[in-house]
Image (tube, rainbow, N blue to C red):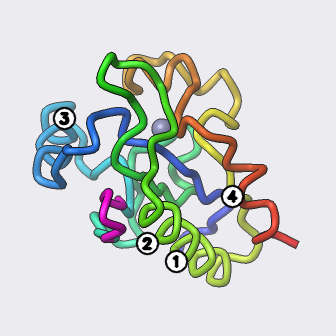
Amino acid sequence: MRNIKYIAVHCTAGSQKTTIESLKLEFKRKGWKYPGYHYVIGPDGTITQLLDESLVSNGVKGYNSVSINVAYIGGIDSKGKAVDNRTEAQKASLLSLLRHLYKKYPDAVIQGHRDFSPDTDGNGKVDTWERIKECPCFDAKVEYQDLQP
Ligand SMILES: [Zn+2]
């Protein structure tokens, strides 16, 4: 298994109606061998695993080899503005997934995409929202600090 240093939290920076299939297509269109995230959580709280944890997903440039990437579907409003629009079901599933992953990788730090160094942004492979470091549109470090002693 890889040495996991980060559990990175993302939003998909799209509509909450975005399907898993269209996400997969988007990753393919970008020419990525593997998806952007290991796990994606839909508005109804369903957790879908896109990639085995032993493989490297494409979430945070420069940190992917030591990260597990987790995303909730959503993150922008109808006008395209960054917003924390997680449903209660998404919040609950995120929490239980992060709790599970942290148990598995107790040396990892749980943080949002925007909490990574600005050097990793704006490289042409991350999307607009990530470049301005809104992702995941809420303060993951604060929200999940109780999970990490
Ligand atoms: Zn992100």
In percent of width and height, residue 110 lies at 69, 58
Which secondary structure type mostly characterizes the magenta part of the structure?
Answer: loop
- Local packing at callout 3 (Cα closer than 10 Å; few below 14, some 14-19, many 20+) is few
Q: CA distance from mark 4 to mark 1?
A: 18 Å
Snapshot quadrant of residue 49: bottom left
Question: What number is the disc on residue 110?
Answer: 4
Mark 4 or 3, nearer chain start: 3
The residue singled out by tag 1 in the image is: 1
- Local packing at callout 1 (Cα closer than 10 Å; few below 14, some 14-19, many 20+) is few
Snapshot quadrant of residue 77: top left
- Where does the magenta region start and end? 40-46
The amino acid marked with disc number 3 is Gly
In percent of width and height, residue 106 lies at 74, 77
Residue 24 counted in the magenta span: no
- Local packing at callout 4 (Cα closer than 10 Å; few below 14, some 14-19, many 20+) is many
- Local packing at callout 2 (Cα closer than 10 Å; few below 14, some 14-19, many 20+) is few
The amino acid marked with disc number 1 is Met
Q: CA distance from mark 4 to mark 2?
A: 18 Å
Locate the C terminus and report the quarter of the image it occupies: bottom right
The residue singled out by tag 2 in the image is: 54
- Residues at discs 2 and 1 in contact (Cβ within 8 Å): yes
Q: Is residue 146 left or right of residue 50?
A: right
Closer to the camera in the image, 5 or 10: 10
Question: What number is the disc on residue 31?
Answer: 3
- Residues at discs 2 and 3 in contact (Cβ within 8 Å): no
The amino acid marked with disc number 2 is Ser
Mark 2 or 1, nearer chain start: 1
Q: CA distance from mark 2 to mark 1?
A: 5 Å
